Amino acid sequence: MTVRAEADLLTELLERISGALALDGTVAVRERDDALEAVLSGEDLGLFIGRHGQTIDAVQYLAQRAVAMLTGEQRRVVVDAEGYRARRRDVLARQADDAADEAVNSGRPVALDAMTAGERRLVHEFLRDRADVDTYSEGEEPDRHLVVAPAAP
Amino acid sequence: MRELLEYLARLLVEAPDDVRVEQFEEDDGTVILELAVASEDYGRIIGRGGRTANALRTVVKAAAVKEDRRVLVDIVD
């Protein structure tokens, strides 16, 4: 299966959804690292992103499933709009650092809010460089969350 | 909303021709969308832990907000 077919599918998927939300957006798809990244650009895309990114994360999940059905392969798909993913990365990095500091200062594990698998992976990566804490995931979807614990001595 | 649900569901199953969406309206104006798929596709449309069904509901609800409606997506046999 060609990247072209996957890109066409993602473009149509995002256009159909933004159309149903009465948003005037344009879609661009590109390959980035090991993922296919589909970006919606336009004005006032808040409804597409949703509260706490709920809608854009749902779109991303459906997009990933649809690509898997088309190609028979599990390919990572990222859906973005208005720089949402970059803003979210900054927020997560700050939360990760705060949780790590709190864990070290209190000597106790600190649980973060529930996150998607992709976001948990980001936080794991942020904190990999810190020798003073360990991270692991706990709980079942959709409540699965990361725990930041002081590193074992 | 109905067209969107039908379109999305068709992308997620092995038998897109068997995807059916029926639309009803409750007295309070709530739109009910009943989604049926081929019997071997229910696992795919519901997903692990209901994740696919929940994602479909979230996206269809966003479309309903735009139309100022309340919508329920029911997956039926």
Image (cartoon, coloured by chain):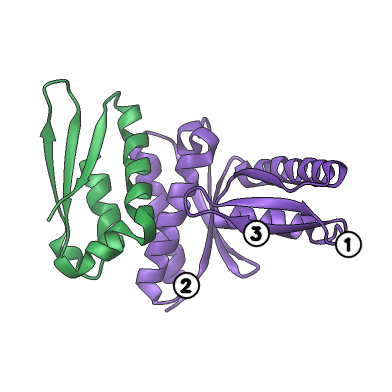
The residue lying toward the viewer, choosing from A98 and A54, is A98
Q: Chain of mark 2?
A: A
Work out how far the residue at label 1 is from the one at label 2, CA to CA, in angstroms: 38 Å
Residue A150: x and y, percent?
A: 81, 53
Q: Position of A54 compared to A123: left or right?
A: left
Among the chains pictured, the one given green colouring is: B
Mark 1 against mark 3, which lies toward the viewer? 1
Work out how far the residue at label 1 is from the one at label 3, CA to CA, in angstroms: 24 Å
Query: Which picture quadrant has residue B20?
Result: bottom left
Residue found at x 40% / y 75%: A71
Mark before the other along the chain sequence, 1 or 2 = 2
Query: Which picture quadrant has residue B66?
Result: top left
Q: Chain of mark 3?
A: A
Residue A6: x and y, percent?
A: 44, 67
Residue named by callout 3: A121
- Quadrant of the drawing holding the C terminus of chain A: bottom right
Which colour represents chain A? purple
Q: Position of A124 compared to A54: left or right?
A: right
Q: Secondary structure at mark 1?
A: loop
Residue named by callout 2: A74
Q: Chain of mark 1?
A: A
Crowd around label 3: few <14 · some 14–19 · many ≥20 (10 Å): few
Mark before the other along the chain sequence, 2 or 3 = 2
Residue named by callout 1: A153
At label 3, the amino acid type is Arg
At label 1, the amino acid type is Pro
**Marker disc for residue A7:** none
Q: Secondary structure at mark 3?
A: helix
